[in-house]
Image: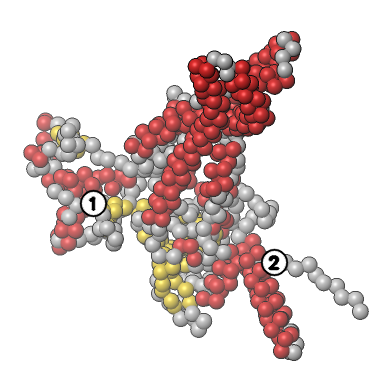
Amino acid sequence: VSVQLAPPVFCHRAASRCWRRGALAGGEMAANGVAPQPSVSTSSRVIAEAEEIRQRYRRLQPGESGAEEKDYKTLVHTFDQPKLSAILKTKITPDGSCTQGEAGLKEDQARHNFECFGKNEITPPKKENPWIKLARMTFCGIFNILLWSCVVAMVLLLLCFNSSDEKTVTSAMESLNATRGSMNETVREVVEEENNDIVTPILLSVIIVATAFLQWKTEQMAEDEMQALQKMQGDKPVPTVRRSADGQRIDQGIDGINLVPGDIVFLEAGDRIPADVRVLHCTDGMEVDNSALTGESMPEPRHNSTEKPNVPCTEARNLAFFGTTVLKGKATCVVHATGDDTFLGKIAQSIKTSRVKSTLEIQIEHFVHFIAVIAIGVALVSLSVKVFQKASAADTIQYTACALFSQVPEGLLPTVTISLMIASREMAKRKVLVRKIDAVETLGCVSVFCSDKTGTLTKGEMTTQDFVVCSSASTIASQGLTVVHRERGSALFPKEKADILESISVCGILNNGAELKRDPVDHSEIWTGSPTEVAILRASCEVQGGSHVVKTLKQKPENNKLFEIPFNSE
């Protein structure tokens, strides 16, 4: 009987779980004497479901995209809502808002997607074991190798010629027995010289190890601080809607790391977009901040209309990307990519290359090569002189080794390391965290910094510096405009100008799309919205006496919002 087996197609996460389940189930049933058909069918079903999810997900990609495609490509912006719903196996309401009725993935489908695609996180770069890193800093590197060669050679010379030194001391004592007074002084000089020879390799070893430990400790502290900052920036749960097994609507908050393709999420101003999403429904004038990806500080509008096929996915206005922020408006979106499959994940994969040597490392390597050539040349000359003088083998080797090691600058390594540590501490005082202390020297080499836009160099924040007001509309032509500047010392607007700025500051608070929120943990102020409108709102609050006036003014009946015309710079 010939049996032909088709090659299995596996989803990386689901397949491993299937094989584990199948092995366990098969082992148990074999022990009980029961046929193993149910376990095989169960494993095959899970593998088939995982592969079906993969095949369905590939329909979102262009036809020429491969499994290992490094560029970000998708067709999700060109699909209408019914097609998205069919591909992602999620339910979308006709209006796309998904605020009422059945919507989202079923719980079992979400579980299968999670097993197939994994957590919604970008794979971090592999971290070197800290103890291996310390050993590498201590024993690797061309300059460290040169210094350790000196230490090893000194120790070998001491071990090889220790016996000859003892004979020399003994002969010196015998020859100086007649002159009793000078014997003690001579012996003391010989012993001191021998002790000095022992101290030299020990001291050099301590210097090398201490220098490596200082550099390692500095970089470890910087990495620990960065990890602490990342933990402090934990994301809040994302409002999501799913369906139970019987089709009932389930509104819940899900951690961003547990989102899967097909999830329906709700976003509002100030929220960080937790994955790559397609906008299904949004308010007029919705804007996002893509400066984390593009470097452009200007907000970009978003809508829920289907884009044409010739529009690149990175320029589509109905897509929002992982890591960016909603500045204005509210939106209902469907997740179409998570983790390494997102736009930000593709960027992270493309920069996972080996670290380029810094300018300092290149200069030190060149200097060490130069010193090594000189040291070898001096050693050869010393060897030639001793051979010409017909000296003993012990004297020749010892003299040549001393001439070789005297050319090595043992103090260079600690001097450079301590200088870089001082520079990194000075940078830390200016709120600059230095992960690699070599980067401090590279930064010091920069004389001119060229940039084509300011968004790359700033935090995307703006500040109102001046108010320009007039007494009344009838006096503009005759009296002109009054400019109110911030005071130089306090950087605040002068209190004596509060009457002039009363009307314009009230308008700046009420006619504004930015919002002021409070952090639930430390109750700090969080300003969300367009950078321009946030700047106007903060300046207006300063004039009115504090941020508490925002809530007071907006609660007055005469200040109710009737309608809104979104700001458009075009």
Depth order, front residue of 36/264: 36
Find residue 531 and report its horizontal and vertical position in percent.
32, 45
- Which label sits on residue 10? 2
Compared across the picture, whether 284 is left or right of 360 comes to left
* Mark 2 / mark 1, whichever is N-terminal: 2
Name which residue type carries label 1.
Asn
Q: Residue at x 53, y 65 (%)?
A: 260
Other residues around mark 2 within 10 Å, as few (<14) / some (14–19) / many (≥20)? some
Depth order, front residue of 149/282: 149
Find residue 59 and report its horizontal and vertical position in percent.
63, 62
Res 140 visible? yes
Mark 1, secondary structure of its residue: loop
- Which label sits on residue 429? none
Q: In which quarter of the image is the N terminus?
A: bottom right
Contact (Cβ within 8 Å) of mark 2 with mark 1: no
Name which residue type carries label 2.
Phe
Find residue 58 and report its horizontal and vertical position in percent.
64, 61
